Image (cartoon, rainbow, N blue to C red):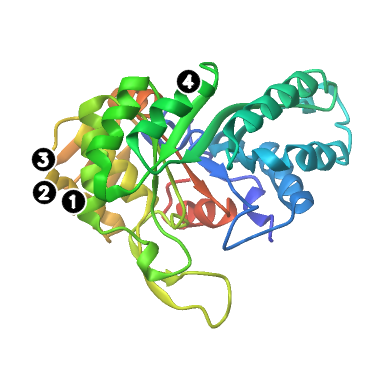
């Protein structure tokens, strides 16, 4: 994977501009997962490079299954020791819970206790967990198992999102939406995405997205990196987050669906003080509030693809 994107930019983004506020900590790195499906060592090495790069401020958490935390610990121990104290990096992790959430949370507790004493190399701490659930009652049950200090993101079927989001809100937890996969049927219809985002906004439930969001704008791409991969229309992460922010600001669902399906880069205009889509505007402060309390991040198995696309659009 090319690291050329980390050469010094001639016009670095001001981190307090509307673009900077929208993109800060936006991309959770999921290199372990399809379609990249990298091994632990190269995934950890990539995250190490990204976390010390020019674009480190866009980088969010490292996504890892809780059952592979020991493997992660071994991989991070093999990284070169930072040369100076200024190279110290605090890694933020999000762990996927498996079939035994109680055992996984115990494993996370032990891992965090060990890794907080890992200095002077790097400190890595699991600060959130992600888990698939099949019923609203399961959200309530798992919320009693998952410690309150861990942010918990629940992924559930979009077809019944109203009931699931109500349970997430009741427990003071967060929601997760899957936006794609390796086949066309894994990409949710725009109306389902808008319903999810609207319900989250109405219930004050923060959310993250995952899968299928390698590119900023809705467009046609191959579903995997294989040369014979099928292709189809993929949601854009800029579309998803702008639609979410506009919904939170009071935009009607029908209009937000048009934001989600927007394919023209020129339709979105970024200035220091805010961003606009057609005649609709969001201030930098509205963006900051929504990113902090509502639209958290999205997971991607590639960090370079979305960053390169943003640079092509002259947003970075």
Q: Give whichever of discs 4 and 3 has the lower sequence position.
A: 4
Give the percent coordinates (x, y) of residue 208: 42, 38
Mark on residue 257?
A: 1
Label 1 secondary element: helix
Q: Give whichever of discs 1 and 3 has the lower sequence position.
A: 3
Label 3 secondary element: loop
Q: Quadrant of residue 305?
A: bottom right
Marks 2/1: CA–CA distance: 5 Å
Q: Which residue is mark 3?
A: 252
Asked whether the residues under the numbered discs 3 and 2 touch, taking CB atoms below 8 Å apart as contact, a structural biologist would say: yes
At 47% from the left and 69% from the top, the residue drawn is 223
Give the percent coordinates (x, y) of residue 93: 63, 33
At 50% from the left and 53% from the top, the residue drawn is 306
Marks 4/3: CA–CA distance: 35 Å
Mark on residue 254?
A: 2
Q: Give whichever of discs 2 and 4 has the lower sequence position.
A: 4
The residue carrying pointer 2 sits among few (fewer than 14), some (14 to 19) or many (20 or more) residues within 10 Å by Cα, namely few
Label 4 secondary element: helix
Left or right: residue 236 versus residue 29 is: left
Q: Which residue is mark 4?
A: 144
Left or right: residue 243 versus residue 207 is: left
């Amino acid at each position: 994977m090319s690291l050329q994107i980390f050469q010094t930019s001639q016009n670095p983004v001001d981190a307090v501009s509307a673009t900077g506020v929208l993109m800060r900590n936006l991309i959770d790195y999921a290199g372990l997962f399809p379609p990249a499906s990298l091994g632990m060592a190269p995934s950890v090495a990539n995250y190490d490079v990204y976390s010390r790069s020019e674009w480190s401020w866009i980088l969010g958490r490292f996504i890892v299954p809780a059952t592979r935390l020991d493997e992660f610990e071994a991989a991070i121990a093999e990284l070169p020791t930072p040369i100076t104290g200024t190279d110290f990096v605090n890694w933020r992790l999000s762990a996927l819970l498996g079939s035994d959430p109680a055992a996984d949370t115990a494993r996370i507790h032990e891992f965090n206790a060990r890794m907080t004493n890992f200095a002077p190399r790097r400190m890595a701490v699991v600060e959130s967990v992600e888990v698939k659930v099949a019923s609203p009652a399961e959200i309530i049950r798992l919320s009693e198992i998952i410690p309150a200090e861990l942010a918990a993101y629940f992924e559930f079927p979009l077809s019944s999102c109203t009931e699931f989001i109500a349970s997430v809100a009741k427990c003071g937890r967060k929601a997760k939406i899957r936006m794609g996969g390796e086949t066309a049927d894994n990409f949710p219809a725009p109306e389902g995405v808008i319903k999810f985002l609207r319900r989250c906004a109405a219930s004050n439930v923060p959310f993250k997205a995952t899968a299928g969001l390698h590119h900023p704008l809705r467009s046609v791409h191959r579903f995997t990196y294989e040369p014979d991969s099928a292709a189809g229309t993929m949601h854009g992460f800029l579309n998803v987050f702008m639609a979410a922010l506009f919904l939170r600001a009071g935009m009607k669902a029908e209009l937000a669906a048009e934001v989600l399906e927007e394919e023209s880069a020129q339709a979105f205009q970024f200035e220091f003080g805010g961003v606009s889509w057609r005649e609709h505007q969001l201030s930098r402060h509205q963006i900051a509030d929504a990113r902090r309390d509502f639209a958290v991040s999205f997971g991607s198995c590639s960090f370079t693809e979305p960053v390169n696309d943003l640079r092509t659009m002259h947003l970075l």
